Image (cartoon, grey):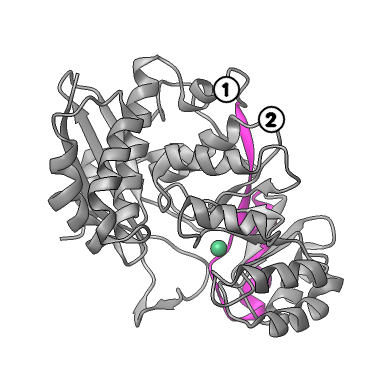
Amino acid sequence: MAIRSVKAYPLSLPFDIGGPKPIFAGKTREMEMLLIRVETDDGLIGWGESFGFSIWPASLEVIERLVSPLAIGRDESKIDELMLEISRKLHPLGRAGAVIFAISGLDTALWDIQAQKQNKSLATLLSAESKAKIPAYASLIRYNNPDLVAKNTAAAVRQGFKAIKLHETGFDEIKAARDAIGPDIHLMVDTNCPWSPEQALQMCEKLEPLNLFWIEEPVWPPEDHEGLALVKRKGNIPIAAGENALGYSDFNDLITKQSVDYLQPSVTKIGGVSEMLRVMGLIKNTSIRLAPHSPYMGPGLIATAHLIAAQKEEIYLEYTFCQMDLNPLGESVLTQDGFFNISNQPGLGLKVDMDIVQQLLVS
Ligand SMILES: [Mg+2]
């Protein structure tokens, strides 16, 4: 059989975070999703997602102009062969960023189709002993306000989450969260690369009494793996990073340089399910734990959940803490009491409401 079409739908999803939304690149943050639909000539439909977050117009162009023409007519079951060929053809355009985000969506959709053809969920295709549900952590968007942090962390605990991640860099905000949730809830802090290694170490010293589960990307630039390793050695707080790694060799470098305790590949950014599996292979038989990056609300989130469910270890799913009233994937993207249920339907088990897709489409 062969791929008949590859289509991309840029969506803007309404969401409420219990406070003002942060500004990114001069604009209020939207929840953007680049939804990828792949159809085969025997009528199977697979869904994928390419990293949205303000960059989707570039990825959309890549899919429509380059990826789709290279994929149409090709055997959808030969995922490795097709991804390798597309990667080789497009490599002069960059080995990270919009091109790889675009490829990621195609790859995930092909895995969805592959699992459907075997009448297995993706999780079961990856492991016969996959889990039916996995724990999620509430990933809070940045508030820059201790009162709003306290209010929303408490709300996340009331919803059943046993682990919460902040996107804050201020000590007062982080302390407010710990005070609001007490000592027993895991608290992570994602700082998004703000500091030099020396500044990061100073912050780690201040934050150590708050008993953080991990501190994420404390060092600028993200590729300063030596600097990150220094913070890991001396900072007394576990380190998480990887969402900005520039592909497989960069992940390997993070591991070789002993820069992380938690590795964070992102299925919509690094090349889809295929590349996630390769990167996850790097930390087999090491003390490094997997903590995938998944602050998105589409097939990328579901694929990440299936990848986690196929692992023996207990691994948290990153889940954006927000109220979302309209999503074409409906209830399949919701958590229950801090857990995410894995569908046992074939593939990713998605029923995508195309009326809602049309309603949320960005023109
Ligand atoms: Mg992060």
Q: Quadrant of residue 272?
A: top left
Q: Which percent across, then down, holds residue 270?
A: 43, 51
- Is 16 covered by the magenta stretch? no
Quick one: 322 or 22, which is closer to the camera?
A: 22
| Amino acid type, mark 1 | Ser
Q: Left or right: where does residue 78 sit relative to residue 20?
A: left
Magenta span covers which residues? 132-160
Figure check: 113 above or below 280: above
> Residue tagged by mark 2?
312
Quick one: 4 or 75, which is closer to the camera?
A: 75
Q: Residue 331's mark?
A: none
Characterize the local packing of mark 2: few (<14), some (14-19) or many (20 or more) Cα atoms within 10 angstroms: few
Q: Which percent across, then down, holds residue 235?
A: 80, 72
Which residue is depicted at the point 70% across and 85% down?
Answer: 199
Q: Residue 127's mark?
A: 1
Name the quarter showing ligand 1. bottom right
> Would residue 321 be seen by someone viewing this image from the given angle?
no
Figure check: 179 above or below 196: above
Q: Secondary structure at mark 2?
A: loop
Position of the C terminus, as image quadrant, is bottom left
Q: Left or right: where does residue 58 sit relative to residue 54?
A: left
> Would residue 65 be seen by someone viewing this image from the given angle?
yes
Which residue is depicted at the point 40% across and 21% down?
Answer: 346
Characterize the local packing of mark 1: few (<14), some (14-19) or many (20 or more) Cα atoms within 10 angstroms: some
Inter-mark Cα distance, 2 to 1:
9 Å
| Amino acid type, mark 2 | Lys
Q: Which percent across, then down, holds residue 99?
A: 29, 56
Q: Secondary structure at mark 1?
A: loop
